[in-house]
Image (tube, helix red, strand yellow):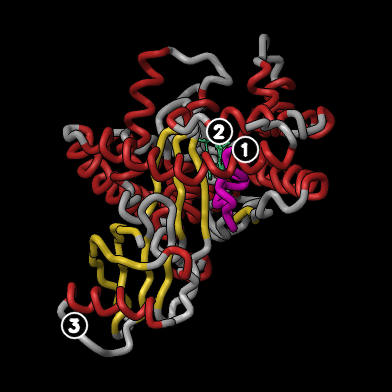
Amino acid sequence: MRTYAFHIRLKRDGEWCDAVAGGIWWNPGASSGNGSGEHRYPIKVIQRVLNKPGGTAQFIMRPVMGRFLCLGEEKSMKRMLSGIKPTGQLHLGNYIGALSKFVSYQDEYEMIAFIANLHCITVPQDPEELQRNLRDCVALYLACGLDPKKSTIFLQTDVKEHAQLGYIMCCHTYMGELNRMTQFKDKQAHGEKNLSGGLYTYPALMAADILIYDPDYVPVGEDQKQHVELTRDVAIRMNNRYGNLFKVPEPLIPKVGARVMSLSDPSKKMSKSDATNKGCIYLLDDLKTARKKVMSAKTDSLNQIKFDPENQPGVANLMQILSSLSDNRPMADIEAEFAGKGYGDLKRAVADKVCAELEMIQGRYNEIIASSMIEDVLKEGAEKARAMAQPKLANIQRAIGMEII
Ligand code: AMP
Ligand code: TRP
């Protein structure tokens, strides 16, 4: 018998409510959630905590230290993992394509969200700026709504197993596969000099980041799909060679907002490496600047508000931003609202939505950055992540035959 502290969510009459129950006793050896007497005991404890006895509550118990126990009607939660590489300031594309999705998934899935700082140094970084970007990234994860009680949030380098498994993955990835990765090919095609070996082998490290936690899903924007597919190939290869080592994860690409385009050049994706900065809205842009960027977004001379990414990429991009920030409002709905109206009206509506979202995020960001929350969250997150990664790496090395003791 061992003691654990749980964060608990209860569904009662269709409504979720939060509760925390510490020191629940149960027998870890029998924790399959099959409704035996042993499992009913914690339910009683929870009901006492909430002072709402009886009834038909559904229980999801969130684990501390990677342990998970599920009771009642709700069956086991699927696991999800993703990361962001803060080589610069986070922007609206990161928010719409990735971060806001992590937040909405954290209630239904066991979410692992890390900051990919090893991936940052695949391109040259200024140490002070990198430090700032990393802190900002954690603060923005939290400000955008990631909740450390529900999600495991940590810095990649605080869990050394990522780097070690990264090397092992590198040895199981073919050069031909790495040569096909478009991110590396694009940089090469742009004639960038002195590209690092780390940039070339980065997809193998990304495979390690994922596979070490056996997630079911990997939510990412469109540009990362190829890397998740490579991860699947390597997982299948290693499973065939060594026995069932890894769960083979699925990429999860949002239907709307998987590729937010630059406002100044809608043929390119919105990106931190936007040289002019005009096409990219950063989450920490002041509201006036953000509004100005939207109002001067490139459109076309067709003067009609239709969702037609091929012929009207600028307008379609604005509509995609508006839809994503309004609970994926259907495009037909937006078209109907703006029928007969001009691009100025559409831009104003987008600017209002973007500014309202930024204002909310920045308000929380300012509170978080002034507190000691970042350190506390990272420390706790790293402990939880290590508890999953350490035994997994040991298993993998044993299966490969690398371990003696
Ligand atoms: P990165 O900034 O490259 O580390 O990307 C972090 C996450 O944001 C990944 O899931 C990307 O796919 C996603 N992302 C980056 N840029 C965009 C964009 N312009 N539109 C949608 N998603 C994006
Ligand atoms: N490569 C991702 C990006 O540039 C960041 C990343 C690193 C990642 N490891 C990951 C994303 C694992 C998902 C899962 O955006």
- Ligand 2 shows up in the quarter that is top right
Q: Which residues are magenta?
A: 209-223
Q: Does residue 220 appear left or right of residue 201 in this picture?
A: left
For label 2, the residue is 162
For label 1, the residue is 208
Q: Is residue 27 above or below residue 372?
A: below
Q: Is residue 317 above or below residue 87?
A: below
Q: Is mark 2 within 8 Å of ligand 2?
A: no
SS at mark 2?
helix
> How far is mark 1 from mark 3, CA to CA?
44 Å
> How far is mark 2 from mark 1, CA to CA?
6 Å
Q: Is residue 88 above or below residue 143?
A: above
SS at mark 1?
helix
Label 3 or label 2, whichever comes before in sequence order: 3
Label 2 or label 1, whichever comes before in sequence order: 2
Callout 2, which amino acid? Answer: His
Callout 1, which amino acid? Answer: Ala
Q: Is residue 148 magenta?
A: no
Label 1 Cα crowd, 10 Å radius (few <14 / some 14-19 / many 20+): many
The residue lying toward the viewer, choosing from 327 and 199, is: 199
| Position in image of residue 162 (x %, y %) | 55, 33
Q: Does residue 50 appear left or right of residue 259 in this picture?
A: left
The residue lying toward the viewer, choosing from 39 and 343, is: 39
Residue at image x 50%, y 55%? 320
Residue 380 figure quarter: top left
For label 3, the residue is 52
